[in-house]
């Protein structure tokens, strides 16, 4: 008996944060129905059915053909059509978009105590850049920490040019409250060691072992200082070129950087170049970096940034059972086929050697991020025999 390949639909619907139930089916080998009864005269015998053949009608018939069971494919809702020869059971399998890892690199220099327009430089209260920024960060990270793995790194780490290697809050899921707490116990007063902050952030990101897309979000209000090639006690020496190169180096290492300029920024040209070097410049605006002046504009900028990093990577998990193959799948967006595209231009492809995750590229990814495509489904192919 020859083996056959059946298309068994295990619908893996991939909305954010969902787990799905997949119909996992194991098939017994097909069995024969009884042979048809021979005809009494010369006509051909009738065809057998799955539960046995029927008698031929000719006068010299040779009997009905051997009856064979029919292998049924699953319905699109994951249930199985009636088939007495299959043994099906529900298999729970998580399937969710891979959330981006985003490390916030937050400037805590003394000028963060100024108001956005620099009209106030001391005791500015709620109007200080620091309070405006931290209010926005607190709002956004707590609202999105189930969809984004946030982390937090301050620069400097003390009231000088020093930057610690470890982040104040390591990247992880649902840690918005930890970030809010870290911000609440932190004050301003350092120099602006942007180069060292970016380098420390990229070095930390390189230690992460998950396959999630990774970004850094640099929020600063001024010209980088603390050039390490100059005397250590000269914290006000400009380090624009060093900061620009650090962001470029991070991109080479695989970590794109968004740049947010807070208030009436000093060194806008440097921020522009850092945004370009980071690989995620703002388009269609006067600056390549995101210029913000208050809490509301920073919240809007962060929401725009999150829209750009919305994940098009999906965990599909291992195949439901030994009869299916994770190497043989079909992908659909709202029921419409998406072709596999190894060039990553417009289609999908696997993201790891185990073939347990996929990424959608090009216009289809844009549609997923925009919400035009609301669900992605995967059909596992099942070999039965």
Image (cartoon, helix red, strand yellow):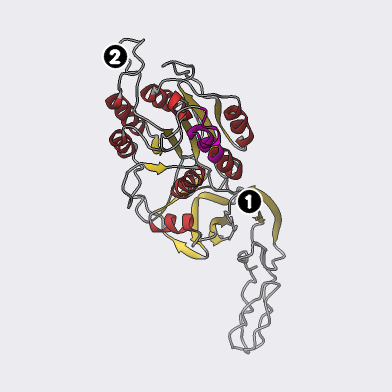
Tell me the SS state at disc 1: loop
Residue lying furthest front: 119
Is residue 125 toward the left or the right of residue 272 in the image?
A: right
**Disc 2 crowd, CA 10 A, few/some/many (<14, 14-19, 20+):** few
Residue segment shown in magenta: 123-136
Label tally:
2
Q: Determine the secondary structure under disc 2.
A: loop
Residue 102 placement, left or right of 278: right
- On the image, the x and y values in percent for residue 56 come to 65, 84
Q: CA distance from mark 1 to mark 2?
A: 50 Å
What residue does disc 2 label? 229
Q: Is residue 184 magenta?
A: no
Specify whether residue 129 is painted magenta.
yes
**Is residue 54 or residue 241 the one in the foreground?**
241
Q: Which residue is mark 1?
A: 18
Q: Can residue 3 be seen in the rendering of this structure?
A: no
Report the side of 80 relative to 307 (left or right).
right
Circle 1 Cα neighbour tier, 10 Å, few/some/many (<14 / 14–19 / ≥20): few
Q: Nearer the viewer, residue 189 or 167?
A: 189
């Amino acid at each position: 008996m020859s083996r056959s390949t059946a298309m068994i639909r295990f619908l893996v619907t991939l909305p954010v944060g969902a787990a799905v139930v997949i119909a996992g089916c194991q098939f017994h080998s097909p069995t024969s129905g009884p042979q048809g009864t021979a005809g009494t005269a010369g006509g051909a015998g009738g065809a057998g059915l799955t539960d046995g053949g029927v008698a031929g009608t000719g006068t010299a018939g040779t009997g009905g053909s051997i009856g064979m069971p029919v292998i049924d494919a699953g319905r699109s809702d994951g249930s199985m059509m009636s088939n007495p020869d299959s043994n099906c059971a529900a298999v729970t399998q998580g399937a969710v978009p891979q959330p981006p890892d985003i490390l916030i690199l937050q400037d805590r220099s003394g000028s963060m105590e100024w108001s956005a327009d620099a009209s106030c430089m001391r005791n500015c209260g709620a109007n200080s850049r620091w309070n405006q920024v931290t209010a926005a960060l607190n709002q956004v990270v707590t609202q999105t920490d189930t969809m984004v793995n946030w982390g937090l790194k301050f620069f400097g780490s003390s009231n000088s040019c020093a930057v610690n290697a470890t982040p104040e809050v390591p990247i992880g899921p649902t840690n918005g409250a930890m970030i809010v707490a870290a911000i609440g116990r932190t004050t301003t007063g350092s120099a602006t060691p942007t180069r060292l902050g970016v380098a420390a952030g990229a070095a930390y990101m390189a230690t992460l072992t998950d396959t999630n897309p990774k970004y850094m979000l640099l929020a600063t209000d001024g010209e980088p200082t603390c050039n390490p090639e100059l005397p250590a006690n000269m914290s006000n020496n400009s380090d624009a070129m060093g900061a620009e190169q650090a962001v470029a180096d991070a991109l080479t290492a695989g970590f794109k950087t968004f740049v947010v300029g807070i208030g009436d920024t000093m060194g806008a040209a440097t921020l522009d170049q850092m945004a370009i070097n980071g690989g995620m410049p703002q388009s269609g605006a006067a600056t390549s970096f995101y210029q913000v002046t208050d809490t509301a504009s920073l919240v809007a900028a962060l929401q725009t940034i999150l829209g750009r990093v919305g994940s098009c990577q999906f965990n599909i998990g291992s195949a439901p059972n030994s009869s299916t193959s994770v190497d043989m799948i079909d992908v659909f967006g709202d029921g419409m086929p998406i072709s596999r595209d190894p060039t990553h231009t417009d289609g999908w492809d696997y993201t790891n050697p185990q073939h347990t995750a996929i990424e959608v590229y090009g216009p289809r990814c844009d549609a997923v991020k925009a919400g035009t495509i609301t669900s992605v489904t995967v059909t596992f192919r099942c070999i039965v025999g």
